[in-house]
Image: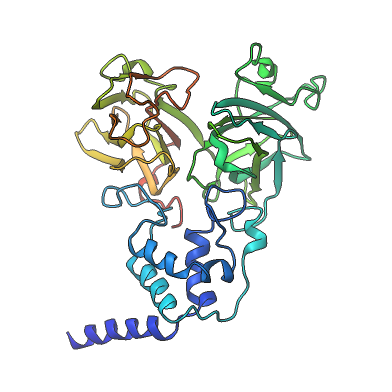
């Protein structure tokens, strides 16, 4: 007992006596805070340099001790994900002790230059950016736009990570990207137009670039970071093709500009297992099976909607999931029930917040056996007590194909691949 007390006392003494910014605090801030607190992101200020952190030290101490920041909405007692952004007790105590010691700087180098370009740990190998600067007018109307971004590279490249980028994410409701190979050299991928307004007639003019088999499909939502894959797993960008980047711009009260694109990081190792993406719920598989049917959320009440889908095919392994709802979302829960009636938890978000969404990455593959059923259970608060309700007074909210933010969604995207023996015991993402 004495030895244990001594160890606890020693660790506490070490935290109090050895605290400096570069040695102890910077690693926490760079990993957990800087991905949002950097140029172009939605956070109101940067946390990339010592001076950025030191001048807000008292405020930072309070919000981390209150566990307001960094925001992390998933219930860690249900599933503890590899990309957990929340702080441990030790990390919170480290920051608090540093503040109490008057923020000693120590020796080191700030990460400002790298984080101006990416939140990944290295610079991108290829950056694809829209030619057009989009102007979101300050008329409180949302807009959908699609940008055609052509590319030609020497060889097809295996991708280990992809990151949506924008110089102004505050105006982006969400973004989706499609990579299409264009083999026919007679097809001019560089010609005009390079941008289309999806709210205008004839906005499907980029259909001719869409291949029957996309190289990859993914997206970004507020709060999410980059998407990355373990060694030997991922997808390959072709030598020649187009990136079709669809951006949904949120309503704005003043004119805003935005330039968007993606950063791509090549893998040194060839892809042995190609990832796949599937979407469940509204706008995806099982849309018509959401109960109660029809997916119309009545006003002045909290409603629960459910979806159950079977896996009639082969076993597969889940790497990550992306739950998605809009402003009246209240809670989101997903789980699997096997044919043997075993329950496999996927995600539980008891207090949904549209501003902080995430692509949740599992520490180990989640095996979904043939014959299993995937369950989604979502609550919606369509009352006047919900401060995010877009309608005052509340009114019936629907889900249509154009997915306006004043409508609702009940969606879960899944990144997966065919099952391989031993997957359920294998590490997927390093925390």
For this orientation, the residue located farthest to the top is 201
Looking at the rendered image, the quarter that the N terminus falls into is bottom left
Q: How is the image coloured?
A: rainbow
Q: Left or right: 85 with respect to 368?
A: right
Numbered disc total: 0
- Residue 66 screen position, x and y as percent: 33, 61
Residue at 38% x, 51% y: name it.
72
Residue at 25% x, 25% y: name it.
300
The answer to whether residue 376 shows anywhere in this view is no
Residue at 65% x, 16% y: name it.
203
For this orientation, the residue located farthest to the left is 1
- Residue 260 screen position, x and y as percent: 65, 38
Looking at the rendered image, the quarter that the C terminus falls into is bottom left
- Residue 380 screen position, x and y as percent: 30, 30
Residue at 44% x, 50% y: name it.
428
Q: Is residue 126 above or below residue 383?
A: below
Image-quadrant location for residue 309: top left
From the viewer's side, name the closer residue of 320 and 37: 37
The answer to whether residue 117 shows anywhere in this view is yes
Q: Is residue 304 above or below residue 87?
A: above
- Residue 92 screen position, x and y as percent: 37, 68
């Amino acid at each position: 007992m004495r030895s244990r007390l001594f160890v606890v006392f020693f660790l506490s003494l070490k935290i109090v006596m050895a605290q400096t910014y570069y040695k102890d605090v910077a690693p926490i801030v760079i990993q957990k805070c800087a991905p949002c607190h950097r140029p172009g992101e939605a956070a109101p200020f940067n946390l990339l340099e010592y001076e950025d952190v030191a001048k807000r030290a008292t405020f930072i101490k309070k919000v981390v001790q209150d566990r307001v920041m960094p925001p992390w909405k998933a219930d860690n007692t249900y599933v503890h994900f590899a990309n957990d952004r929340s702080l441990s007790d030790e990390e919170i105590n480290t920051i608090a002790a540093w503040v109490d010691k008057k923020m000693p700087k120590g020796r080191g180098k700030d990460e400002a230059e790298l984080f101006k370009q990416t939140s990944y740990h290295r610079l991108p190998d290829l950056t694809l950016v829209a030619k057009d600067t989009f102007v979101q007018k300050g008329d409180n109307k949302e807009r959908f736009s699609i940008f055609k971004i052509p590319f030609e590279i020497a060889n097809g490249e295996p991708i280990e990570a992809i990151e949506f980028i924008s110089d102004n994410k505050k105006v982006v409701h969400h973004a989706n990207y499609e990579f299409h190979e264009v083999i026919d050299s007679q097809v001019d991928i560089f010609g005009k137009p390079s941008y289309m307004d999806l709210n205008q007639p004839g906005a499907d003019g980029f259909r001719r670039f869409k291949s029957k088999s996309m190289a990859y499909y993914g997206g970004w939502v507020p709060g999410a970071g980059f998407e990355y894959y373990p060694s030997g797993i991922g997808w390959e960008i072709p030598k020649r093709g187009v990136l079709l980047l669809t951006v949904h711009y949120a309503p704005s009260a003043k004119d805003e500009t935005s330039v968007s694109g993606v950063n791509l990081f090549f893998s040194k190792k060839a892809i042995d297992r190609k990832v796949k993406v599937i979407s469940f719920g509204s706008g995806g598989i099982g849309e018509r099976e959401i109960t109660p049917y029809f997916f119309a959320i009545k006003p002045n009440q909290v409603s629960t909607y459910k979806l159950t889908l079977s896996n009639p095919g082969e076993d597969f392994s889940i790497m990550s999931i992306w739950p998605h709802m809009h402003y009246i979302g209240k809670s989101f829960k997903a789980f699997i029930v096997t044919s043997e009636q075993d329950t496999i938890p996927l995600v539980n978000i008891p207090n949904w917040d549209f501003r902080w969404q995430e692509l949740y990455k599992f520490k180990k593959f989640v095996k979904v056996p043939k014959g299993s059923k995937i369950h989604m259970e979502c609550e919606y608060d369509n009352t006047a007590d919900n401060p995010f309700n877009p309608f005052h007074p509340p009114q019936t909210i629907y889900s249509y194909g154009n997915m306006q933010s004043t409508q609702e969604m009940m969606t879960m995207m899944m990144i997966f691949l065919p099952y391989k023996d031993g997957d359920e015991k294998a590490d997927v993402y390093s925390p």
